[in-house]
Amino acid sequence: MVANIRITEEVKQALRKSDPEIESKRLDLLRGRRILMVMGSYPGKRHMYLHARELGIKMVVLDGPGHWARTGVEEGLFEQFIEVDLYPTKTLADRALEATNTAGLHFDALATFEDFAGPLTARLARNLGLKGHPLPAILASRNKITANQTLRRAGLSTPRFFHIQSAEDLEQAAALVGFPAVLKPISGASQVATYRVNNEEQLRSRYAQVMSEIDGHLKTRMVHSDNETELTWANGVDMTLEEFLDGEEFDVDMLLSEGGNVYASVTRDLPNPYLKSGGSQMPPDFPPDKQHEMVLFAGRVLHVLGFMDGAFHVEVKYTSCGPRLIEVNARIGGGPLYELHRWVWGVDLVEQYLMTCLGIPIRPQKAPQPATHMVTSDLICPYSGVIMDADFLSAFTSLPQVVRCKTFFKAGQAVTGPDRGVPDSLGEIMVYGPSVGAASRTLNELLNQVQFPISNLQTVFQPEFQAAAK
């Protein structure tokens, strides 16, 4: 097969097999294609774009003024940048379609690595006559209230929840949901404004804090996809109070093709008391039968919501009553997950996802046994202050078991700890080993050596953070 061949039903039929030679033909179909990447997301996704370019894909990014992807055009990473202010959201789809048409380019597909871009991508795909997620499915997945209602109607167990539209709803929310509970935006991401609350007093305090932080502090124009706070509240300041689920948190990453589950892998999220990702473990040290339960549950969730193709990151908890949903992300998982799947299972989510965007049937070949065992830490900020030295991980970079370690902040930047809000991730350490236990021991040894160079030490290093880090 050669690049830009028409992907007819006859071609698709030949590709519905799991075979190395067929996989090579699928990759051939990616070369030379032009894909519109809707919202470029944060710079940490750059490695996925670099790989897409290696595959021979021509990428055009649509995003707001000031987004980092514009410089990617100058570097040759992207073919073109289409600028569209992401505010106001009510007119975004029409303005984005107009700007795309004005660019005068032919697109073979639309894709996105950004959670907030789901509805816009679906609308653009429909208007351009290209493949995309069903709009009702993506709208339901982006709204935690709608998702829970949809799943409950289908007979799936969901946590108790209450839609909070104002402070007047807090008393009723507390009475219905009970405590402990989780307060969060109905359409958020990356744990923005997400807090555990243990009683009604904490609920009222956190709600007032969130409303105070956004009142008058949000941008109203010149918004791009790296403006996470603005996009969280783009369609209003509604929140949800949800029952706090017992048990451990896991991520189920899945690939769907023509309605079928063709790949799934479970990642364990390391414990963290602040409802923010603290690290991961792949493959997880967790009973295989319970992992299988979570895969079946995640697949059922995606089916009920109406998804058919693509890459999905489904966050679940394995509770005392079995798997329960936290949220659905219709995209490749963030952070290091894309790389973890390649290293552990030999499956490239970027390649497979972009194939589905073109309508190519996929059959990824998952290794029968893990090639290695990976454990990561996100280095959750223990207290608020200012970073005095950004090289506090430099001693680890040359260690043989360390795949990567990097910091996310520069010297002089302010950082937020749990004393002031949702804590920042200060950096990332990734290690590997012959087993999960060996990799975990290596990581714990490194974490015991980390000293955070943060000024303004008025808040003591909290014991629950120390426990979570270990």
Image: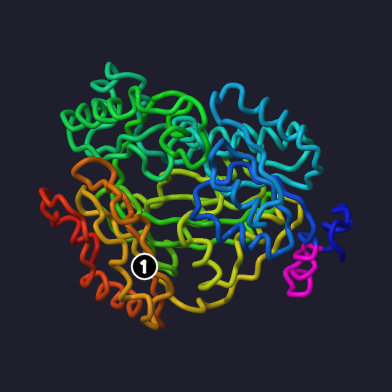
- Looking at the rendered structure, the secondary structure element under dot 1 is strand
Q: How many marks?
A: 1
Q: Nearer the viewer, residue 103 or 32?
A: 103
Q: Nearer the viewer, residue 388 or 243?
A: 388
Looking at the image, residue 68 sits to the left or right of residue 279; the answer is right
Which image quarter: residue 291?
A: bottom left
The residue singled out by tag 1 in the image is 429
Q: Look at 40% across and 47% down and name the residue there.
A: 324
- Residue 324, compared with residue 463, is above or below; it is above
Residue type pointed to by label 1:
Ile
The quadrant of the image that shows the C terminus is bottom left
Residue nearer the viewer, 118 or 148: 118
Residue 311 visible (yes or no): yes
Q: Which residue range is magenta in the image?
A: 15-28
Quarter where residue 210 is shown: top left
Asked whether 327 or 78 is in front, the reply is 78
Q: Tell me: 152 left or right of 470.
A: right
